Image (cartoon, rainbow, N blue to C red):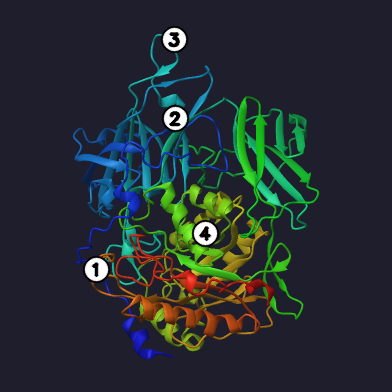
Amino acid sequence: MDLIDAIKAIDKPHEDDVLNRLFTPWGENLDPEHVLAEYPRPQFVRDSYINLNGYWEYSIVPQPSEFDTKGLNNAFGEQIPSKMDGRILVPFSPEAMLSGVEKRLLPDQYLWYKRTLPVLKRSSENSRFLLHFGAVDQFADVYVNSSFAGSHSGGYLPFTLDITDLLKFSGDGSRTLEENELCVRVRDTSDSSYHSRGKQTLRRGGMYYTCQSGIWQTVWIEEVPENYVRQIKITPGQDLQTVSIQVSTCSPCKVTVKIPGHEMVRSPESTGSSGWKSTEETFLSSDTCPCGPDGKAPSDSCCYDFEFRIEDPHLWSPEDPYLYPLVIEAGNDNVRSYFAMRSFTVEPDSEGIYRFFLNKKPYFLMGVLDQGYWPDGLYTAPSDEALIFDIKEMKRLHYNMLRKHIKVEAARYYYHCDRLGMIVWQDMVSGGSSYAKPVVSYLPTLFPKVFGRMNDGPSHYKTFSRGDSEGRSEWLQEMLATIRHLYNVPSIATWVLFNEGWGQFNAAGATTMAKDLDPTRPIDQASGWFDEGSGSFRSVHNYFRPLTVEVNNENRAFVISEYGGLACHIDGHSSVDRIYGYKKYDTLDELGVAYYNLVNGSMKPLITKGLSGVVYTQLSDVEEEVNGLITYDRRITKINPDLDPNMTSGINNQ
């Protein structure tokens, strides 16, 4: 074990640092009149689309002293500031350079947004207008024409509101909407509370990054008929020949589902219960189905089940990412979608070693850790092309998997992974109170077999920063909501529940809940340490010790879900002069030699011994953490894949 490097890697807060003003090529050339203008929901497409990105007014004000978290209602509409502070470019958070604001929202402040909605023409007398937010960090209350429209809690999932009844229509009978005002009030506790926040912190430094707040994904409106498709659920069969499609509508109607070579119709008489239907207790995070003002899901959906058999299916893989088109017609509503025929499982190979299987064959996961941070946009990629660049560049570097680390991305990220062929391991977003880093991070990193085996049950809730029962309940609801939201994404292969003990609790129980909701995907219960013995993988982090394989008899595959972290600071392309990483190199040549020695000399020989996958840390530099394969500004790729163009050829034939 390299003890000196491990000690140097202890992260420290450096919140007083002034970060260098780094811009990505896309941020540098951003057109404020056309910000992230692409259709935001590629797996559920309608023709109606009004993008609300662009300049809004904003104001940051103190939180009233009499603030009551249970009093989020119409009364707050009277507090909309009459005078705003200036303009903010939505959907960039106020902390991001691209927002034009560059101010931090503190836990005891409100961030208000305000804009006038564009003039809209209602296509029919009974149509509805749905307002969509891709994500708002962390608590959002929405007002239309000063009337309360609805609330949402949680900074990483989408939500939808039906605002039709709050809109003002012209009095000439033309069904024109004009002079409508939209306001959003945001509060964000960041890491001062138990709410989920990922790697955001008010005291950035090391592996923890600048906190951000407010609207950070696309805001948009669509017009739908009175009866419309609320949700779809797509499940490719494990037999790789059938696909199940469930459709939810507002009220009974004829529903038609079309895929290439097949068409099936269901009438109201065939309505049946489908298990995934929302209940009154479920708080809804959806980019398709509106929640009520209280955040709860509607309970009157009408559900239809379809099952198709596909002869000679064209299977999806990173090498051949084939997608099937899908069309759903329900009354006057028309939705276009897609799906893939593929299966992800953990099974024994011909020698009895449990491995990750893609489409019933062993498949080695060559993964990279993807933090999803940008120097100019923070959580928000400056453009669609920026998302595509990251995925394509990792494929060029011979990777076939991205571990989306403690963040949920915009829907277009997953769409590009689907169509470009990149497997995704999706982390849940971590929360909990202030982490006891010596106990949950430093000691397990150095001595995992001694300090990485602590039970995560009630006796250790406080040690794991989970002493608050409301926080535990909230995280479980968010885990389930994340799985529901991303269930249809073909490229997502594994749910990663906990990482390095951050806010971990009852991992075995959470694994059961996740598996009950989605039995089609493997689960990485605890990435790093504090493994509770369930889930589909024995998942370890190893930065400072020789790489090894732990062969077990628990019917689980072995993965090294974090390793590498080789750091190289490049002047002019780094946020600060300070260097954080797990082993430091002065030149790109030295870094390249160490990288290829690690992959070819230490990692690849373990595949035949039972290694099922790895995740290299990491895709890009982030602030003072300079262990990326590419620089934070995405202008330099540190590793030259042409030095070993055959590095992964045949890796799945061993």
| Image depth: mark 2 or mark 4 in front | 2
Q: Position of residue 478 (x, y in %)?
A: 50, 55
* Residue 563, image x, y percentages: 47, 77
Residue 525: % across, % down: 57, 70
Q: Amino acid at mark 1?
A: Val
The quarter in which the C terminus is drawn is: bottom right
| SS for callout 4 | helix
C-alpha gap between disc 1 and disc 2: 45 Å
The tag on residue 163 is 2
Q: Quadrant of residue 83?
A: top left
Q: Which residue carries the number 1 mark?
A: 576
Residue type indicated by callout 2: Ile
Which marked residue is nearer to the observer: mark 1 or mark 4? 1
The disc, 3 or 4, on the residue closer to the chain's N-terminal end is 3
First in residue order: circle 1 vs circle 2: 2
Residue under label 3: 173
